[in-house]
Amino acid sequence: MTVMVRYRYLDAMGDVVTEREFDDREAALAWAVEDDELEEVQRVEYLGPEGDWRWAGALPI
């Protein structure tokens, strides 16, 4: 069974652009880099097991 994790994509001001679920961190970061409509996204966070948002990584500007 694959565990899906919720990721949120934030712009430079920290505003949420979108949220999606992925089964691993690499796929979540790659999706944002590859999607041309997400150019404003600069960082990614994931929803931790305790219900708090945690750093997943930065995206190239």
Image (cartoon, grey):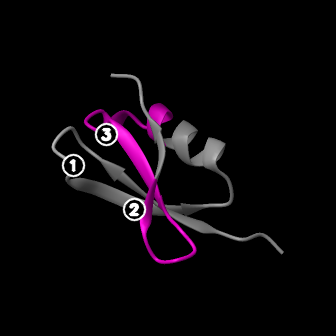
Q: CA distance from mark 2 to mark 3?
A: 11 Å
Is residue 35 a member of the stretch shown in magenta?
yes
Q: Earlier in the sequence, mark 2 or mark 1?
A: 1
Please determine whether, in this image, residue 17 is positioned above or below residue 30.
Answer: below
Image mark for residue 19? 2
**Which residue is most to the top?**
61
Which secondary structure lies at badge 2?
strand
Circle 1 residue: 14
Q: Residue at x 59, y 66 (%)?
A: 5
Image mark for residue 41? 3
Label 1 Cα neighbours within 10 Å, binned few <14 / some 14-19 / many ≥20: few
Pick the front one: 36 or 61: 61
**In which quadrant will I find the C terminus?**
top left
Given the image, on which type of amino acid does mark 3 rest? Val
Label 2 Cα neighbours within 10 Å, binned few <14 / some 14-19 / many ≥20: few
Range shown magenta: 32-54
